[in-house]
Amino acid sequence: PVPQDLAGRHALVTAGPTHEPIDPVRYIANRSSGRQGYAIAAALSARGAGVTLVSGPVSLPAPPGVALVPVETASDMLAACEAALPADIAVLAAAVGDWRVTHPGTAKLKKRPGQPAAPLSLTVNPDILASLSAPGPRRPALVIGFAAETEDLLANAADKRRRKGCDWIVANDVSLPGDGSPGVMGGDRNQVHLVTADGTEAWPSLDKREVADRLAARIAAHLAPHSLIR
Ligand code: C5P
């Protein structure tokens, strides 16, 4: 039986890609399947947490007992996260698009003959992890981000942890093959490092569900001495 050591806690989880509209028929997206984030939401819920899962467009069912908030864009995801606060725990596993189209077309954009460049200008999206990690009364006690890197994994992850102000980073090398899949993105397995203020732990290659269970157990152990929000 799973221990109910997160009973009374509220966890906010983000998952999946974002879709940034170009015009009514096109968007900018990425290859995130949402599987790792959904597994984390399920694992936290199984330990008794109330879970709000803010998810970009994916083809996964909401885990039982989890409150799903579907969103499309990074801006919508940030607004949904803020609306879900207060939370004891935030696990931001979404692959948030870095850029959005500055002025999405209200009608389908046309190719103009002889025009070599696309008529698009991009704007940087808000950083949800940095925003939720900022000090203040509504900051969750434990904020966890993800780092998908293809080079200098641990140095980049440690740097990201400090820069964004989150507590832990789950770092994975997306250049590794995910056991039969072209890469960790979209695969079933994940090989991660947990980066905290105390240093770095290498976890073995695990099923995404096992990564989620292990992370949920670590979260519960970390929060045990913290009092509940509100
Ligand atoms: O900066 P980078 O995208 O590599 O950081 C990854 C981490 O930051 C992930 O936890 C992701 O969910 C989060 N993130 C975010 N908002 C963004 C970009 C990334 O929450 N705009």
Image: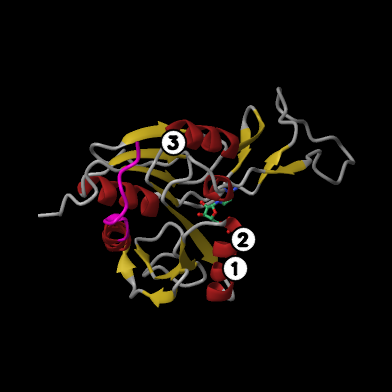
x and y percent of residue 115 in the render?
88, 41
Q: Which mark is residue 163?
A: 2
Q: Which mark is residue 85?
A: 3
x and y percent of residue 66 in the render?
29, 37
Q: Nearest the camera: 164 or 72?
A: 164
Quarter of the picture holding the C terminus:
top left
Mark 2 within 8 Å of ligand 1, using the beta carbon: no
Near mark 3 (Cα within 10 A), the count class, few <14, some 14-19 or many ≥20, is: some
The amino acid marked with disc number 1 is Asp
Q: Earlier in the sequence, mark 1 or mark 3?
A: 3
Residue 61 visible within the image: no
Distance of mark 1 from mark 3, alpha carbons?
26 Å
Distance of mark 2 from mark 3, alpha carbons?
22 Å
x and y percent of residue 56 in the render?
47, 40
Residue at the spot of label 1: 159
Q: Nearest the camera: 65 or 135?
A: 135
Mark 1 within 8 Å of ligand 1, using the beta carbon: no
Q: Residue at x 26, y 56 (%)?
A: 224
> What element does badge 2 sit on?
helix
In this view, 132 is above or below 220: above
Distance of mark 2 from mark 1, alpha carbons?
6 Å
The amino acid marked with disc number 2 is Arg
Main secondary-structure element of the magenta-colored stretch: loop
Residue 161 falls in image quadrant: bottom right
The amino acid marked with disc number 3 is Leu
Q: Which mark is residue 224?
A: none
Residue 90 visible within the image: yes
Q: Is residue 176 left or right of residue 3?
A: right
> What element does badge 1 sit on?
helix
